[in-house]
Amino acid sequence: MLEIKNLHAKVDGREILNGLDLTIPAGEVHAIMGPNGSGKSTLSYVLAGNEDYEVTEGSISWKGEDLLDMEPDERAAAGVFLAFQYPMEIPGVATMTFLRSAVNAVRKARGEEEFSTPDFLRTVKEKAKELQIDIEMLRRPLNVGFSGGEKKRNEILQMSLLEPGLCILDETDSGLDIDALRIVSDGVNALRSPERSMLVITHYQRLLNYIVPDKVHVLSKGRVARSGGPELALELEKSGYAEYGQDEASAA
Amino acid sequence: MDLPVQQFRTEAEQELLDLFERSVDALPGDASIAAMRQAAIRTYAGLGLPHRRVEAWKYTDLRGALINVPPLIAELDVQVGESELDAAIGKACLGLPAYRVVVAAGEFRGDLSDIGALRDDGVEVVSLAQMLESPADWLTASLEDAAGRDDDVVIALNTALMTAGVALRLPEGLTLQKPIHLIHLDMHGALGSIYTRNAVVAEKGASATLIESFGTLGVKELQRNAVTTVSLAEKSAIHHIKLQREAIETIHLNVWAANVGTEARYNAFQLSSGAALARNQVYVRFEGENAATDISGATLARGKQHCDTTLVVEHNVPSCESRELFKLVLDDEARGVFQGKIVVKQDAQKTDGKQMSQALLLSETAEFDSKPELEIYADDVVCGHGATSGQIDEDLLFYLRARGLPEDQARALLIQAFVGEAFEVLDDEAIGDALTAVAAEWLGTPLE
């Protein structure tokens, strides 16, 4: 279970999160929606441990442990996974090498045995196939020259390999066409389980047709302004974010 | 002996002259070589040791760095076993299948070298000291050509004081399947100077890979001066690889000078991680059309190490191509220097020259100095240069850490990725893997 209480966070001296409360029980999928600038991505970075974001007040507890006390890699080992809105390109690091280093680092930290090369290759091939990722793509440098859809599928592949307990998807739908959206959503849905919590961050309701959440929260000015069931997303699709203070035009 | 009068000599400058006086009678060579040595020491006496006001040494003050000059080493009976070689050169490079040639303590070591195998496979290979006693025409041409670069103090001192090395000639059409691995070592002891010279001649259509590695057996304050000349006839190809991992107190001066004939290719790659002060000079002179060179490498430096790579490519004839890519990783107070000079003579139309140097600074006190110099006298050429220096990208670091990589490992992976780009030019996968392993070892092991 993830428990966020009264979370305040700053970036570049500007307060973005302003008393956010959120609880996600094991096995549930929660969606966070909200206008641009409401703090959606900030929440995802704070959860993953990006040092550019300073937590000034509040607490985050994950499975009873203080998440704020952990380094980003310790959080990954503890099962926190952030699928980035903009996955990084790293020339000079083959995707396969990266995947293997990440998986083995996490397994090691969890006290599990590292994968042997054949076992690892078999697992990657299996999961890549489900996400319709060409194995040749994994021999290329990490995300370099990948299309938007390929990058997002690569994120979901990493998520599936690292077997996290908390999956945070930050605007995973951005830049995806309808086919890619379906593949990515199928990949995410395949990972739904009674032990796993998910936080799906999105601006648009469209993604939630594919990944149907248990709860929807609307973020406004750095806190949860409203919570409800999946029907809340549909309502927002009609009414827009106008009543939540900011909209796309004013966010910039 | 008549010496040109230099206004002022530092102690070390005078000691170099004294070293020559003391050693000259014992140095190998016939009368023609003796005359060459005398001419060279006069060249040195006129120039003195280079310092910051000499443009080509703007960032490397050799005169200031040489406090004194230790005695010349030329010892034959130095114990060199596999364990010593392992420690000096490292398993990764030592393990490459290659013809081994060892030059240790200023002497050529036939007993440790695969001379028989090289000769069986068609290579003419002779101890340089032996050949200096009655030099073949091709060796004399090589030596005279190097001596012709009479503004270069490193070469002048080398010509004056060279004690050993190898002369290699690849006859017409010979393609050597395995690389030649030339291992340069010192000896066990406190201090000393080592001057070695190698001459490589590739006749028409011949091709080979030459790896030169430099390691330390035990001399603490070694002054190393090593020169290799390479002469490439029409359609020949030489891949010339260097691994320098000498002890941290070493002063390492090295020149590779290549003359490249029509449609020939000279590729040089240098990986440097050792020495207190290293100066790597690579000179490439195009003498025939449609020839090409690629000079690349990586410098890994920390502590107070100073590593200077100075390249001069002379496009004297039309339609030749040159490529340069150097990557430097600099930590602590290390200083990296890259000077790349491309000269395009008036006749050298259709020249294609590109140069890039990139430094990754791991600390605020590390320094990178880059000086591109393009001298272009022809009007139909494509030439470009670039230099960058930067730090580790924090966003990339966070991405890797968010995937579970501990910070140290994430940093090492990013540094390796940065350096790795330079290794991509190596055609030979085994050599590429071996050098990558050396770089990985450097990243994983703190400076002692």
Image (tube, coloured by chain):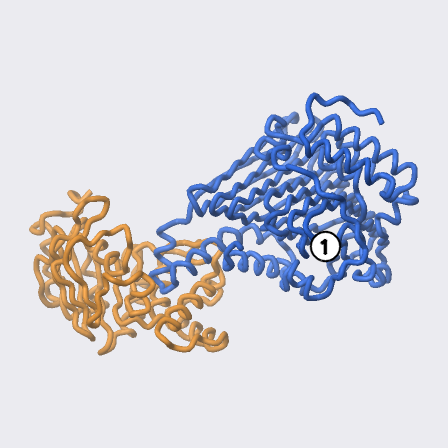
> In the picture, which quadrant includes the N terminus of chain B?
top right
Q: Residue at 75% x, 32% y: name it.
A: B149
Q: Is residue B108 above or below residue A186?
A: above
- Which chain shows up in blue? B
Front in this rendered view, residue B260 or B352? B260
Pointer 1 local density, CA inside 10 Å: few below 14, some 14–19, many at least 20:
many
Q: Is residue B219 left or right of residue A198?
A: right
Determine the image quadrant of residue A50: bottom left
Residue A213 horizontal/vertical position (percent): 18, 69
Query: Which hue belongs to chain A?
Result: orange
- Image mark 1: chain: B
Q: Is residue B158 left or right of residue B338?
A: right
- The residue indicated by pointer 1 is B187
Residue A1 horizontal/vertical position (percent): 19, 72
* Secondary structure of residue under mark 1: loop
Q: Is residue A63 left or right of residue A224?
A: right
Residue B325 horizontal/vertical position (percent): 57, 44
